[in-house]
Image (cartoon, rainbow, N blue to C red):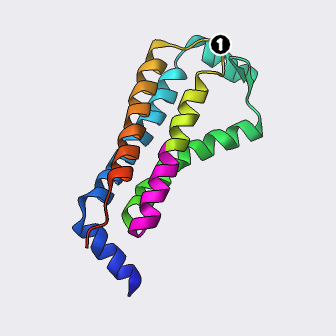
Amino acid sequence: MKSQNTLQTNLNNPIPGLLSKLWVFLGLNYILCDVLSNMEMAVLKGLFEGNIAGIEMTQGFLLIAGISLEIPFLMVLLSTVLPYKANRITNIVASILMIVYQLGSFMVGSEITLHYMFFSGVEILGNVVILVLALRWKQSI
């Protein structure tokens, strides 16, 4: 019965749906940035050598990269099914984590390209929007 109440509450409140859509938007941006990055000659050469901008493409690195890409897609689902308090906290934590991750990506590697700066700006802004929405979100009765 409690899960039905949570679902009904989420259906009556536009915030969970908006958060979910923002996570879809961000997930697509993360992937599109990576696709464009893989079109750069230096990146292509590095992929064949197993080293991109000084970062060795190890199993551990690829696992961390995979986890970072999974977060926004997991949040698409969680934003629509979690009850208010867990939903709010999860969106706050995930958006902060993704902002830190994106800012940290500027510290790694040698060259930051124009398209990477553009997508990073969009991604950071999108995560800030999610953070602000989650922080201002008040439970509806």
35 left or right of 23? right
Kindly identify the residue that appears in the image at 43 percent across and 66 percent down.
85
Q: Residues within 10 Å of mark 1 (few under 14, many from 20)?
A: few
Q: Is the magenta stretch mostly helix, strand or loop?
A: helix
Kindly identify the residue that appears in the image at 42 percent across and 58 percent down.
88
Q: Can residue 125 be seen in this view?
A: yes
**Looking at the rendering, in which quadrant would you find the C terminus?**
bottom left
Q: Is residue 134 depicted above or below 99 in this figure? A: below
Residue 10: x and y, percent? Answer: 30, 68
Q: Is residue 26 depicted above or below 51 in this figure? A: below
The residue identified by callout 1 is 110
Residue 128: x and y, percent? Answer: 40, 38
Q: Does the magenta stretch include residue 48?
A: no
Q: How many labels does the image show?
A: 1
**Looking at the rendering, in which quadrant would you find the N terminus?**
bottom left
**What kind of residue is marked 1?**
Ser
136 left or right of 54? left
Quadrant housing residue 101: top right
Kindly identify the residue that appears in the image at 29 percent across and 52 percent down.
18
Q: Is residue 77 visible?
A: no
- The residue segment tinted magenta is 82-95
